[in-house]
Amino acid sequence: MAKEMIIVLDFGGQYNQLIARRVRENNVYCEILPYTASLEEIRALSPKGIIFTGGPNSVYDPESPHYSKDIFELGIPILGICYGSQLMAWALGGVVETAPVSEYGHTDTCLDVNSPLFEGCSEKTSVWMSHTDYIARTPEGFNIIAHTPVCPVAAMEFPDKKLYATQFHPEVLHTAEGKTILRNFVKNICACEGEWKMESFIESAVQELREAIGDKRVILGLSGGVDSSVAAALLSKAVGKQLTCVFVDHGLMRKNEGDEVQRIFTQRFDMEFVRVNCQEHFLQALKDVVDPEQKRKIIGTEFYRVFWDEIKKLQEDGLSYFAQGTIYPDRIESGKGKNKKSAVIKTHHNMVEQPKDVQFLGTIEPLKDLFKDEVRAVGELLGLPRDLVWRQPFPGPGLGVRVIGAITAEKVSLLQDADWILRDEMSKNGYESQLSQFFCVLPGVNTVGVMGDFRTYSDLIVIRAVTTDDFMTADWARIPYDILAKVSGRITNEMKGRVNRVVYDITSKPPATVEWE
Ligand code: XMP
């Protein structure tokens, strides 16, 4: 879609998506390819520049990821970062060895600001280092353009061949002038103009969707989450009433959320909207089920049973296209390979297989090239409300994993009411944006309380709130006591007779998980 492209060649480092994000911040489209991508594949994409990522290996280890030397002869500018810099040095005849002193973290570095890579930077700056090997001798033709007290080649260049390398990580924010360095590479060295803007993305995506869909119908499963909502808005702009959104409401959404989703999409957007209300069906399927994994499996299975049944009905008069809100991070093939094994902690039901008896004309993924923040920007440009676009993650099984133990309609409604008060108070105090996620949990425990002269015996509500970058680990949020006091006061007052105690979960992940089930 974009004419200008930078390729990030992934050698297994941990910041690879970050590099791509930083490049895109310069309005230049960027794709991540595994280091196993062939030279022909790279050439076919005509990139204006290539960035080699970091990686955990040593270049002189025969098992470590390498790349054909021919890549340096393409005439395309290359920036090697960390492992990528060592790979460049080693492949072109330099010497890489174990550094006498490893560097990790903030490191004072001297830059040669005459290099186009460091244009506009300070001569002395702080960079982020993380290495045990280093370039002991540069290959022929290279100049050293940065050093630290213990690293003689913190950066090198061969301007005639447009080859550049940094031992440090310009992509992380700890590198004080990292953004300038990457911008210099993308704009000055690769001569990119910066045409990747979300306004033009929408324009060309609409055009392409119209061509792909023609006069056919396209069906999208709408969950009310960010990705499917933005996909719906974009498809609506492209094909209007040819789009049918199927919204399966399992009755385990937050208070009023189902109605809100329906209101937004039916009032603001041109489309066919099918809402399948099936709380009864789910409650029946979940009756007396206590085991969290079993609950997740039932909710996942039933959800898709209802969904595919609805799609079969819709397709009785002819096949349609199937749209999905897949985004770029969902489909990046990492340089670490695909065979990483990990234990199943919780079954997420987002990824499903299409049943054999459901056919489509084809699959359409209008957001497949966008990062999450780009998806949000597109959503805002298309007129989706801010609170939907910036919505916190919400688990597929919904409140089903926040009502602990067996689920009933009463318990769901009690939890919805308490959770609504928490959200209302957070929003009134402007505290929402400080947290990654917050919600209430109903553990299904009654405790003794006192009201006036009487003993009470009612439900306990838990508040859970976390801050995190990636949800793999999370810290419990230090919400000010005053706000917690207000929430607790409101829940116990407004829910008199139903809740008589509120507690705050002060456990991080690990050892806990964010959700309780
Ligand atoms: P845990 O509880 O695993 O949650 O620490 C991490 C993040 O994932 C969300 N979550 C889910 N999201 N389907 C989803 O789409 C699920 O089944 C699911 N379970 C947990 C959770 O809300 C948190 O943001």
Image (cartoon, rainbow, N blue to C red):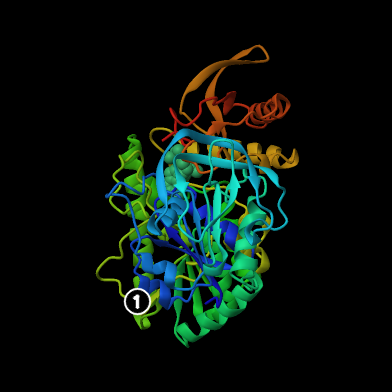
Residue 499 vertical placement versus 12 (above, below): above
Element at label 1: loop
Farthest-out residue, left: 356
Task: Report x, y in % for residue 73.
Answer: 43, 71
**Where is the C terminus found, in terms of image quarters?**
top left
Tell me the crowding category of disc 1: few under 14, some 14 to 19, or many 20 or more residues within 10 angstroms, Cα based.
some
**Image point (31%, 41%), residue name:** 344
**Image point (41%, 61%), residue name:** 331
Q: Nearer the viewer, residue 356 or 8?
A: 8
Q: Nearer the viewer, residue 513 or 295?
A: 513
Total labels: the figure holds 1
Farthest-out residue, front: 140
Task: Report x, y in % for residue 143.
Answer: 56, 56
Kind of residue at badge 1? Phe
Q: Nearer the viewer, residue 486 or 274?
A: 486
Residue 253 vertical placement versus 362 (above, below): above
Quadrant in which ligand 1 is drawn: top left
Q: Nearer the viewer, residue 318 or 204?
A: 204
Residue bearing mark 1:
360
Task: Report x, y in % for residue 473.
Answer: 48, 36
Left or right: residue 517 versus residue 187 is left
Residue 396 can be seen in this image = no
**Image point (50%, 72%), residue name:** 47
Residue 77 vertical placement versus 455 (above, below): below
Task: Report x, y in % for residue 479.
Answer: 66, 30
Residue 244 can be seen in this image = yes
Left or right: residue 442 versus residue 376 is left
